[in-house]
Image (cartoon, rainbow, N blue to C red):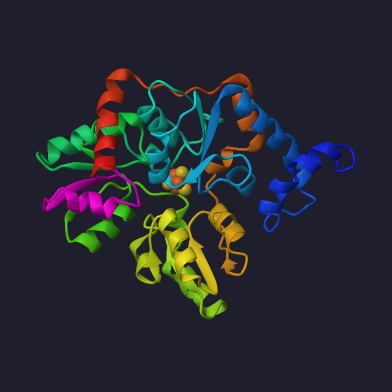
Amino acid sequence: MSLSSAPDLMVRTAPLYDRVKSVIPSIEWPAFAGDIDAILELKREHDAVILAHNYQTPEIFHCVADIVGDSLALAREAMKVDAKVIVLAGVHFMAETAKLLNPAKRVLIPDLGAGCSLAESITAADVRLLRQRYPGVPVVTYVNTSAAVKAESDICCTSGNARKIVESLGVPKVIMLPDEYLAQNIAAETGVEIVTWAGHCEVHERFSAADIQQLRAGHPGIVVLAHPECPPEVVAVSDFTGSTAAMIDYVGKEKPTRVVLVTECSMSDNVAVQHPDIDFVRPCNLCPHMKQITLPKIRRALETMQHEVTIDPAVAAPARRAVERMLEA
Ligand code: SF4
């Protein structure tokens, strides 16, 4: 589609392009405008809302999403959604969490293949074995897990509240699954003994302390914000560690002249839109799972009402309890 062949479409979508013009070249916009226009209409037609994770690309994050945020924010907001249909622009465990908290709503994920290396690293049977090995030790499970794994857990956590959740249990030892690095980082912060699992985020595990040193050498004065799924050696040489939401807060409050967000690629694009005066240095580690979600797939999901996420009720009840305990903590 070219600008001249769709003048009405270009006029209609011009205010949306205005939001993302600093990160999407004008020559690329016509490739997005038709799907965006159709998605906005389909949302009205089906009484649907789109929840998008911070790692979604800017044309999704800023142009079609109704609610954006990290896993914790999406879980919280999913509970307040007043629409018949939820489309989760994120990965499968996020869609499951939305379904757990909205059992009566139809929850769609645009691509069933949008998984997560952490969620795939552990099964419900693994958790049962750990419980046998460490009787009486509470199990804290990262939300980046399947509903079946959540169902075997005492309480969930996100990277945004992991410290608070572990401390809230008031015990000297916990089992924290499945992210080994997050667990090690929380153990260092809290002093609680943590039994870990060897799961890793394939995006964050690729960063090293040497990468950070190189960034500092090449970009004097740079402020380094790292995600707690990064290895502890990365956290140790960073200026701040926090969830994606905490990084956004940090940038908004501290307004560093030059910053690097040591996390998934699209985060910097999405945050840069709101802070045109800040120099974002972008080491690019893409999440191949998050990138399964595209505008054409969101459009198709709304046109066909697929792929619907369902959870066995026997699994859903205990999994929901673990998520709700987290939200109440
Ligand atoms: S960025 Fe890492 S934790 Fe997030 S979905 Fe991708 S693989 Fe999973």
The relative height of residue 245 versus residue 8 in the rendered view (above or below) is below
The image shows residue 272 at horizontal and vertical percentages of: 59, 60
Q: Which residues are magenta?
A: 156-177
Instruction: State whether residue 289 appears in this view.
Output: no
**Is residue 210 found inside the magenta-colored segment of the image?**
no
Q: Quadrant of residue 315?
A: top left
Residue located at (26% from left, 57% from top) = 186
Looking at the image, residue 215 lies above or below residue 174: below
Residue 262 percent across, percent down from the top left: 47, 61
Please tell me whether residue 6 is drawn above or below residue 85 in the rendered image: below
**x 60%, y 29%: residue:** 43
Residue at 55% in and 74% down: 257
Residue 126, image x and y in percent?
A: 25, 35
As for residue 173 lying within the magenta part, the answer is yes
Image quadrant assignment for residue 191: bottom left
In-front residue for pair 82/141 = 82
